[in-house]
Amino acid sequence: MLIDMIAAAGPWTWFILGFALLVGEALVPGIYLVWFGTSALVVGSASLLPFAAVNNWSWTSQIVVFAILSLLSVMLARKFFPTGVEGDDAGRMNDPLGRYVGREATLMEAMENGAGRVRIGDTTWRVRGVDAPAGTRVKVVGVEDGALTVTPL
């Protein structure tokens, strides 16, 4: 019954599917369904062409072309629109102190009993590490319990 309705709609089935996928893309976060929707629209457009060979595609060949176009468009999208950008701080969203790992700073006050303070930018931070006098250059090597872990340079 459903197959008969789809077959009766002909190439317009691809347009309906394509637009439904594009609407779904607007409702779902991320850029994923747009490639499948575009592929469906391309297959529908090709099915409407006046060429006899294309116009008489079987449903099987249309589905195969749709699958190939979808696969190619997703592969090209992953290549030209990468999701992860190197050096992006998005992965540290829940670890804001993690962005300071690797930075160098100067102790504002002496490290006593393994605790002290440094200024990075316009903020002072609690630090932990070996005891050292004020003015010592240190490097941030980690984060522990809301304090930066440092080592003297």
Image (cartoon, rainbow, N blue to C red):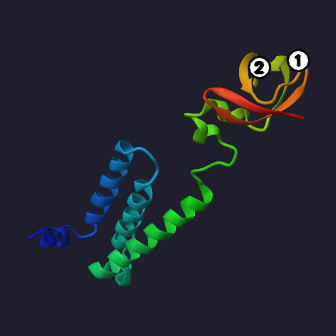
Q: Nearer the viewer, residue 79 or 37?
A: 79
Is residue 147 in view from this perspective? yes
| Type of amino acid at the residue the image marks with label 2 | Gly
Instruction: Look at the image and tell me in which quarter the N terminus lies.
Output: bottom left
Within 10 Å of the Cα at label 1, are there few (<14), some (14-19), or many (20+) other Cα atoms?
A: some
Q: Which mark is residue 29?
A: none
Q: Is residue 57 above or below residue 104?
A: below
Instruction: Look at the image and tell me in which quarter the C terminus lies.
Output: top right
Residue 11 in percent (x, y) is at 28, 68
The residue located at (29%, 81%) in the rendering is 60
The residue located at (73%, 25%) in the rendering is 127
**Location of mark 2 (residue):** 116
| Type of amino acid at the residue the image marks with label 1 | Ala
The residue located at (37%, 51%) in the rendering is 22
**In this picture, residue 122 sits left or right of residue 137:** left
Q: Secondary structure at mark 2?
A: strand
Q: CB under 8 Å between callouts 1 and 2?
A: yes
Q: Is residue 3 above or below residue 33?
A: below
The residue located at (34%, 43%) in the rendering is 27
Quadrant for residue 43, please give it: bottom left
Residue 4 in percent (x, y) is at 13, 73
Residue 136 in percent (x, y) is at 90, 24
**In this picture, residue 35 sits left or right of residue 128:** left
**Location of mark 1 (residue):** 134
Circle nearer the N terminus (1, 2):
2
